[in-house]
Amino acid sequence: MTGSTEGLRILVTNDDGVNSPGIIALARSMAKLGEVVVVAPDRERSAIGHGLTFFHPVRLRSMGLADGISFYNTDGTPTDCVVLGLRHVMKGRVDLLVSGINRGANMGDDITYSGTVAAAMEGAINRIPSMAVSLASYTREDYDTAAYFARLVAGDLLQNPLPDGVFLNVNVPDLPLEEIAGIRATSQGRTRYSQQVDHRRDPWGGEYFWIWGHPPQGVPGEGTDFEAVKNRYVSVTPLHLSMTREEYLDSLRNWNVVKNHRREDSP
Ligand code: MN
């Protein structure tokens, strides 16, 4: 990196849909760093994870230009949007991928469900500096502070190439800028869910289900994303595509089936 932001090409996506206030605030903020192209789902696709559409076609529609930002929507997932954004809409070089600003935090185990974080994963898979940004609130919903910090962190991300397979997960408290305590590097916490299944019947007697839950609770833990946000800090977590727990490999090698099973034991 030269340190110059001139000619930067930035892909922006989300999982809340192309018309959500979070992506508009993010795109406008990123436009101060370079050329922004938005490719986002045409509807809410939250909690779709890293889904990729394989078995039916995906439509891409240009929505035109607004404030110098090109907007596109698709009927696909956030990951589909990244694939189309990189391989069709932007082609060539993409310097940065930013996903968000999600309505609601993406911390702890929520990360595994998140379409917002999955889009940043897709960027990392394609070896592009990538980050997910989420607003840690469903109440106030003012995206200005998060859009500001997204730009600050993005600026640093461009100066500090991450190791292969690493990308950033940023969570911003929903507070006015002057009430933010600072920025913390954090670890992914754990989440306690109160998952509910409502079993109902439709007018024809057929059964159906609603999967829902009360807002998940972060397990308190020092240095975690939850703790930082609770204390009014912006949380920045370096996530990794590899989910292997290296420290457990030796223990697993001592499992009976791994250690002792031979091909001749098979029936
Ligand atoms: Mn969402």
Image: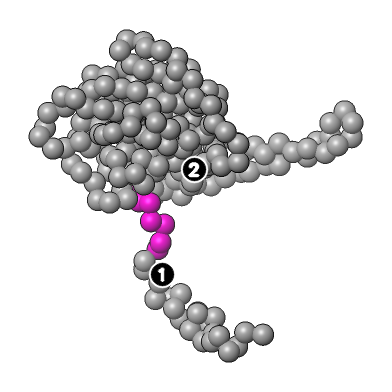
Residue under label 2, please give it: 50
Provide the residue span drawn in magenta. Answer: 237-245
- Residue 232: give x, y in percent of width and height: 33, 31
Q: Residue at x 40, y 61 (%)?
A: 244
The answer to whether residue 222 is above or below residue 259 is above
Amino acid type at circle 1 is Tyr
Q: Residue at x 60, y 36 (%)?
A: 56
Q: Residues within 10 Å of mark 1 (few under 14, many from 20)?
A: few
Tell me the mark number nearer the camera, choosing from 2 and 1: 2
For the image, the number of numbered tags is 2
The answer to whether residue 162 is above or below residue 9 is below
**58 left or right of 133 in image:** right
Give the secondary structure at mark 1. helix
Precedes in sequence: disc 2 or disc 1: 2
Q: Which mark is residue 248?
A: 1
Is residue 8 visible in the rendered image? The answer is yes
Amino acid type at circle 2 is His
- Residue 200: give x, y in percent of width and height: 80, 36
Give the secondary structure at mark 2. loop
Q: Nearer the viewer, residue 148 or 86?
A: 86
Q: Which mark is residue 67?
A: none
Report the quarter where the C terminus lies.
bottom right
Report the quarter where the N terminus lies.
top left
Circles 2 and 1, Cβ within 8 Å, touching? The answer is no
Q: Residue 214: name its quadrant.
A: top right
